Image (spheres, rainbow, N blue to C red):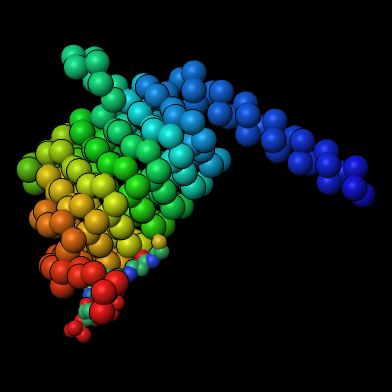
């Protein structure tokens, strides 16, 4: 029984190491102690840069691109970030996630949209494209089920409430929520109360 347990542990460790090497070799960059849990989909490997100590949980779709003109990845995730399960990021040109950002499950982030100008053509056949960059600043927290739309910057250490639809930028230290998201209050230090 113990032998089977040990065998399972060894196989899992080996799979993990193979996985790490695969990402180190193929992504634009992949830092120390980072992990992307299986199954997850990465559209273009060279379009993704990941710092160290980053965790991306399972069932995520990182829809990123390599930009040959600037020799740059369209999706950058800096050190210490945590992205939950079922995350969907559309990074056609520029989604930048700074250090130590916490993203809960089922969050959608996009710098792009489907075109829908022609009334006679199904939207699925009209194509999709970049609209404006998205930035999640250092230390912010994006609540479960939130949607971050093109052109939005989330401020440093700001909080986005569960199920918010963020259509405009949110300042540093703000707590925002709702559809469309509005600032609910500003964070204040309670340490000296
Ligand atoms: C945003 C959040 C952090 C606010 O927490 P809080 O500071 O304790 O705020 P309060 O509960 O005092 O609420 C303040 C006001 O905002 C409203 N509010 C709180 N969360 C909201 C949300 N997600 N959407 C809309 N309004 C919200 C409250 O109804 C309240 O309104 P009122 O003053 O009219 O009664 C919290 O509600 C939240 O959404 N957390 C995310 C949880 C999550 O995603 N967890 C995943 C684990 S990583």
The residue drawn where x is 12% and y is 57% is: 171
Relative side of 28 to 122, left or right: right
**Label tally:** 0
Q: Is residue 148 visible?
A: yes
Residue 180 falls left or right of residue 44:
left
Q: Where residue 38 sits: x, y (%)?
A: 55, 40
Regarding residue 167, the answer to whether it shows in the image is: no
Question: Residue 124: x, y in percent?
Answer: 24, 41
Residue 74, above or below 40:
above
Position of residue 1 in the picture relative to residue 24 (left or right): right
Seen from the viewer's position, the closer of residues 88 and 168 is 168
Q: Where is residue 148 in the image (x, y as percent from the top left)?
A: 22, 52
Pick the front one: 7 or 88: 7
Q: Is residue 9 above or below residue 67?
A: below
Q: On screen, 179 above or below 51?
A: below
Residue furthest front as drawn: 192
Q: Where is residue 41 in the image (x, y as percent from the top left)?
A: 45, 36
Task: Ligand 1: give its quadrant.
Answer: bottom left
Which quadrant: the C terminus? Answer: bottom left
């Amino acid at each position: 029984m113990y032998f089977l347990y040990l065998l399972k542990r060894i196989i899992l460790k080996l799979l993990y190491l193979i996985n790490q090497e695969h990402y180190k070799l193929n992504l634009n960059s992949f830092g120390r102690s980072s992990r992307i849990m299986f199954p997850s989909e990465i559209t273009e490997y060279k379009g993704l840069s990941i710092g160290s100590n980053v965790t991306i949980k399972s069932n995520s779709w990182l829809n990123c691109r390599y930009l040959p003109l600037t020799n740059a990845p369209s999706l950058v995730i800096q050190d210490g970030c945590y992205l939950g399960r079922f995350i969907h990021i559309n990074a056609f040109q520029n989604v930048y996630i700074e250090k130590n950002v916490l993203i809960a499950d089922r969050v959608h982030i996009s710098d792009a949209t489907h075109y829908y100008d022609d009334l006679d053509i199904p939207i699925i056949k009209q194509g999709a494209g970049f609209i404006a960059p998205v930035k999640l600043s250092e230390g912010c927290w994006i609540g479960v089920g939130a949607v971050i739309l093109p052109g939005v910057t989330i401020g440093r250490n700001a909080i986005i409430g569960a199920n918010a639809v963020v259509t405009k930028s949110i300042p540093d230290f703000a707590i925002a929520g709702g559809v469309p998201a509005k600032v609910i209050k500003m964070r204040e230090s309670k340490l000296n109360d």
